[in-house]
Image: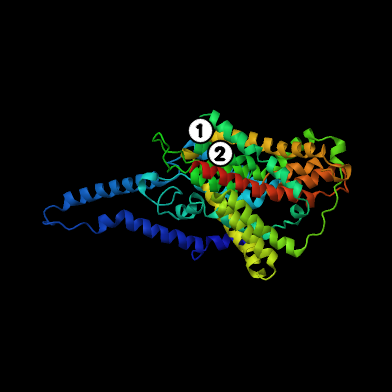
């Protein structure tokens, strides 16, 4: 009763708000009647002016309402917008309900929703991600120009410990074998009719490395460069980036069935020797030697590999802790937000919903599964030539894909599922780190051939 009385008081905020809006509406509607436009002979044409003013007032209101409607999302709605908004909501749901890489899926899901809010494109509002001068377009330049991926590699280098790879270098072969997915997707894209540069960019989805896929597609499949026959390459950055990040986030869903299918119970129970202790000198020398060796092989990958090893030098030097902390915390968080939001927003329905996008997702899924299988099978093959005490648990072969550290965590969980005391995380980090390095080298080689 008390709240009802308060609501009925004339001085309540709600009533005041209605009064203000009512006065504004009356001013807009009746202003032409109260203050008629002066004419050359006002006395002789009063009736005519009043009639014309009244009609123009009604017409003005009608035109105003029509213009307002034309600018709303309802008037510019396209069925594809609804499809993509549902996809964005699904990404957010998966992140909240199952915690599938929420740091990626929530920014990407929100970006998909933002990018598919309908608006009048002909009005030059400068709000769409593909409209020059808009805020989203400026932020998207970090994706389109390949700026964000090297920054992410810098942060990965500052957060990653290469000790497991240094202590057991032969695990590098698991990371190399997992790159099989890249070339399977590359060949599959060629068979499906994509041009050579487009196929190379699509191939990078096979390593489940979002930054590398974005970097290569920004160079080869950006909708700018001309092919030898005069055609312009398609702009596939959005579909490739979304596919790569989707498979990165769904590593805990996609990999376990493949790992269980390709390994026996006996293989799952293999216990590996603990990694040896790595000296500080080795930790410092590894990124320096790795930088020189990999970039001499694939100079085109220098933006990625240079930043990766630079970040690791910051971490291992011991004298740049502030820089390493800044890179591995605030910087990676900012870049993750920007790249997730803009990549999601690039999925504008009229551009993203094409047969090519569907084919890219199918190729990506197949190549990612092949990459996982390639790492596992290569571990089984290596075991044929290793002594019993040096055998490799094939479960860590799945970590050869570049989804760091998620694929290594999956190897750990699958190992614990078979034996609750068999911890594989440290071993799995070796092929996981190797996968990042190898995927960047593969991107550099493809870029060197096709640019």
Quadrant assignment for the N terminus: bottom right
Q: Which mark identifies residue 233?
A: none
The quarter holding residue 319 reads bottom right
Please give the count of numbered marks on the rendered protein.
Answer: 2
Q: Are marks 2 and 1 in contact (CB under 8 Å)?
A: yes
Question: Residue sitting at 51 percent across and 44 percent down?
Answer: 237
The image shows residue 270 at horizontal and vertical percentages of 86, 42
The residue indicated by pointer 1 is 194
Image side of residue 241 versus residue 418, left or right:
left
Residue 346: tell me if it is visible.
no
Residue 333: tell me if it is visible.
yes
Image side of residue 309 versus residue 117, left or right:
right
Tell me the distance, in whole angstroms, between the alpha carbons under discs 2 and 1: 9 Å
Residue closer to the observer: 257 or 89: 257
Question: Residue sitting at 70 percent across and 44 percent down?
Answer: 175
Image side of residue 231 versus residue 148, left or right:
left
The residue indicated by pointer 2 is 202
Q: Secondary structure at mark 1?
A: loop
Residue closer to the observer: 371 or 306: 306
The image shows residue 138 at horizontal and vertical percentages of 45, 55
The image shows residue 377 at horizontal and vertical percentages of 75, 36
Q: Secondary structure at mark 2?
A: helix
Mark 2 burial class by Cα count in 10 Å: few <14, some 14-19, many 20+: many
Chosen colour scheme: rainbow
The quarter holding residue 30 reads bottom left
Q: Earlier in the sequence, mark 2 or mark 1?
A: 1
Identify whether 56 is placed above or below 307.
Answer: above
Question: Residue sitting at 68 percent across and 38 percent down?
Answer: 371
The image shows residue 214 at horizontal and vertical percentages of 55, 47
Mark 1 burial class by Cα count in 10 Å: few <14, some 14-19, many 20+: some
Residue closer to the observer: 16 or 172: 172
């Amino acid at each position: 009763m008390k709240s009802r009385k308060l609501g009925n008081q004339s001085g309540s905020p709600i009533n005041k708000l209605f009064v203000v809006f009512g006065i504004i509406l009356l001013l807009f509607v009746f202003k032409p009647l109260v203050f008629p436009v002066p004419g050359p002979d006002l006395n002789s044409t009063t009736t005519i002016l009043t009639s014309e003013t009244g009609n123009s007032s009604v017409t003005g209101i009608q035109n105003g309402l029509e213009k307002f409607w034309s600018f709303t999302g309802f008037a510019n709605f396209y069925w594809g917008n609804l499809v993509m908004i549902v996809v964005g909501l699904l990404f957010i749901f998966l992140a909240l309900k199952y915690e599938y890489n929420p740091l990626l899926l929530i920014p990407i899901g929100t970006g998909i929703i933002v990018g598919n809010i309908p608006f009048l494109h002909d009005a030059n509002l400068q709000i769409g991600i593909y409209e020059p001068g808009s805020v989203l377009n400026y932020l998207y330049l970090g994706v389109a120009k390949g700026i964000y991926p090297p920054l992410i590699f810098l942060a990965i280098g500052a957060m990653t410990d290469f000790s497991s790879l240094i202590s057991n270098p032969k695990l590098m072969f698991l990371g190399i074998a997992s790159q099989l997915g890249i070339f399977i997707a590359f060949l599959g894209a060629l068979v499906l009719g994509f041009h050579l540069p487009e196929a190379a960019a699509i191939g990078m989805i096979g390593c489940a490395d979002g930054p590398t896929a974005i970097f290569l597609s920004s160079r080869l499949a950006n909708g700018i460069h001309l092919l030898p026959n005069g055609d312009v390459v398609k702009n596939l950055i959005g579909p490739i980036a979304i596919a790569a990040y989707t498979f990165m986030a769904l590593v805990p869903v996609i990999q376990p069935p493949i790992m269980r299918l390709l390994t026996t119970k006996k293989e799952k129970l293999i216990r590996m020797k603990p990694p040896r202790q790595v000296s500080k000198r080795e930790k410092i020398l590894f990124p320096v030697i790795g930088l020189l060796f990999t970039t001499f092989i694939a100079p085109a990958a220098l933006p990625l590999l240079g930043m990766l090893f630079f970040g690791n030098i910051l971490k291992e030097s011991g004298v740049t802790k502030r820089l390493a902390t800044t890179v591995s915390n605030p910087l990676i968080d900012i870049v993750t937000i920007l790249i997730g939001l803009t990549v999601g927003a690039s999925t504008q329905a009229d551009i993203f919903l094409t047969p090519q996008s569907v084919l890219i997702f199918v190729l990506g899924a197949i190549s990612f599964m092949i990459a996982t299988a390639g790492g596992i099978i290569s571990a089984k093959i290596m075991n044929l030539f290793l002594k019993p005490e040096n055998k490799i648990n094939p479960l860590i072969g799945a970590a050869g894909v570049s989804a760091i550290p998620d694929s290594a965590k999956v190897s750990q969980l699958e190992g614990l599922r078979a034996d609750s005391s068999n911890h594989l995380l440290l071993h799995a980090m070796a092929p996981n780190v190797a996968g990042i390095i190898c995927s960047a080298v593969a991107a550099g080689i493809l870029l060197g051939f096709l640019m």
